[in-house]
Image (spheres, rainbow, N blue to C red):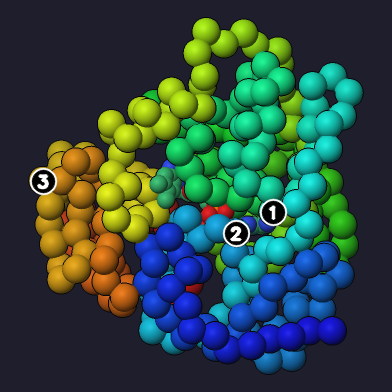
């Protein structure tokens, strides 16, 4: 039974912008997701699968896409040989707490990331470009739903690049779960606390944000943009490529992004947006 509603909220993106979501629903099973896809077909609506919204920018005051919030049961099941089967609705930090308590190596560099497992897998979430480590270093397989069929791909079969996979953006491929594989580790100190301390020192969480905004950009330009402000939205003074937002409207975020793209265009520099725009 589908239940598409219209709601007003500022909780669906970590930019905390306020919107009217004309078509919003929460699915609790793959079967319900299939029903919503049929509803979208009948109403010619685009679908957006929402995890925690920590990489999501809603661009209009009134959002027309069918926003489907992942409300699958949160399951985390231990398998033999330090493997774990997790549903996509589980939080990154739930997995990291499990790994830390069981002395397993893991993607502790994501301890400061407010993401769901589904969102992290869709975005190929990881450390910065220089480090070349992502959650996929720990993925054995991913199970997803596409065109009404349940499919499983092994790690090697999942095409991906920096912050990009076959699941990124406005697709209808719903990640249901993944099998993760870890190896035993000895910790001299708590890796979660270490990473959170690092984030306090190097990132800027003083106001709502979605982490880094561009997946590739020219840093000499980005450094000069620090502190650039439009209304209640500005580039962080503390760290580059990081927008802080106090505004209810996303218009100022969109303008800052457009301006940054324009400056790169004029300087003949490559730029690619990381946050996913949804209208
Ligand atoms: C403070 C802060 C720090 C951050 N640091 C990092 C970092 O160090 N490294 C990094 O990589 N990112 C970082 N990010 C960005 C963001 O957290 C990641 O991209 C994260 O993976 C997004 O997860 P989410 O659940 O919030 O996804 P959302 O923002 O809800 O969605 C992002 C994308 O994933 C898709 N998606 C979500 N769930 C599913 C699903 N179940 N099936 C299919 N597709 C799905 C969406 O459709 C969309 O395309 C940071 C963000 C913040 C706010």
Question: Is residue 220 something that shows in the picture?
Answer: yes
Expressed as whole percent of the image width and height from the top left, the position of residue 50 reads: 59, 64
Number of residues whose C-alpha sits closer than 10 Å to that of mark 3, classed few (under 14), some (14–19) or many (20 or more): few
Q: Secondary structure at mark 2?
A: loop
Which residue is found at the position 51% from the left and 60% from the top?
A: 53
Q: Quadrant of residue 157?
A: top right
Number of residues whose C-alpha sits closer than 10 Å to that of mark 1, classed few (under 14), some (14–19) or many (20 or more): many
Q: Secondary structure at mark 1?
A: loop
CA separation, marks 2 and 1?
7 Å
Q: Earlier in the sequence, mark 1 or mark 3?
A: 1
- Residue 51 got which mark? 2
**Which quadrant holds the N terminus?**
bottom right
Q: Earlier in the sequence, mark 2 or mark 1?
A: 2
Q: In this image, 239 relative to 74: left or right?
A: left
Mark 1 within 8 Å of ligand 1, using the beta carbon: yes
Q: Earlier in the sequence, mark 3 or mark 2?
A: 2
Mark 3 within 8 Å of ligand 1, using the beta carbon: no
Q: Are marks 2 and 1 in contact (CB under 8 Å)?
A: yes
Q: Secondary structure at mark 3?
A: helix
Q: In this image, 138 relative to 164: left or right?
A: right
Which residue is found at the position 27% from the left and 71% from the top?
A: 247
Mark 2 within 8 Å of ligand 1, using the beta carbon: yes
The residue indicated by pointer 1 is 89
Q: Which mark's residue is nearer the viewer, 1 or 3?
A: 1
- Residue 207 got which mark? none
CA separation, marks 1 and 3?
38 Å
Q: Is residue 225 above or below residue 169?
A: above
Q: Observer-nearest residue: 272 or 237?
A: 237
Q: Which mark's residue is nearer the viewer, 3 or 2?
A: 2
The residue indicated by pointer 3 is 224
């Amino acid at each position: 039974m589908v239940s598409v509603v219209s709601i007003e909220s500022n909780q669906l993106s970590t930019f905390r912008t306020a919107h009217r979501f004309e078509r919003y629903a929460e699915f609790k099973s793959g079967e319900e997701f299939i029903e919503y896809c049929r509803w979208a077909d009948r109403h010619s609506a685009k679908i957006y699968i929402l995890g925690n919204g920590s990489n999501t920018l809603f661009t209009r005051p009134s959002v027309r896409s069918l926003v489907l919030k992942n409300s699958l049961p949160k399951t985390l099941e231990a398998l033999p040989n330090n493997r774990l089967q997790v549903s996509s609705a589980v939080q990154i930090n739930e997995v990291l707490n499990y790994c830390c308590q069981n002395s397993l190596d893991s993607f502790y560099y994501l301890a400061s990331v407010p993401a769901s497992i589904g969102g992290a897998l869709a975005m190929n979430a990881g450390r910065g470009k220089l480090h070349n480590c992502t959650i996929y270093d720990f993925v054995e397989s991913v199970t997803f739903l596409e065109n009404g069929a349940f499919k499983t791909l092994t790690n090697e079969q999942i095409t991906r690049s920096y912050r990009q996979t076959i699941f990124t953006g406005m697709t209808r491929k719903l990640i249901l779960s993944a099998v993760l594989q870890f190896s035993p580790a000895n910790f001299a100190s708590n890796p979660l606390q270490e990473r959170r301390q690092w984030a306090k020192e190097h990132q800027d969480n003083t106001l709502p944000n979605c982490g880094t905004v561009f997946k590739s950009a020219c840093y000499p330009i980005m450094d000069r943009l620090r502190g650039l402000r439009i209304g209640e939205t500005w580039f962080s003074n503390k760290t580059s490529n990081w927008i802080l937002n106090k505004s209810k409207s996303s218009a100022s975020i969109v303008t800052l992004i457009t301006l940054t793209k324009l400056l790169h265009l004029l300087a003949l520099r490559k730029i690619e947006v990381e946050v996913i725009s949804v209208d």
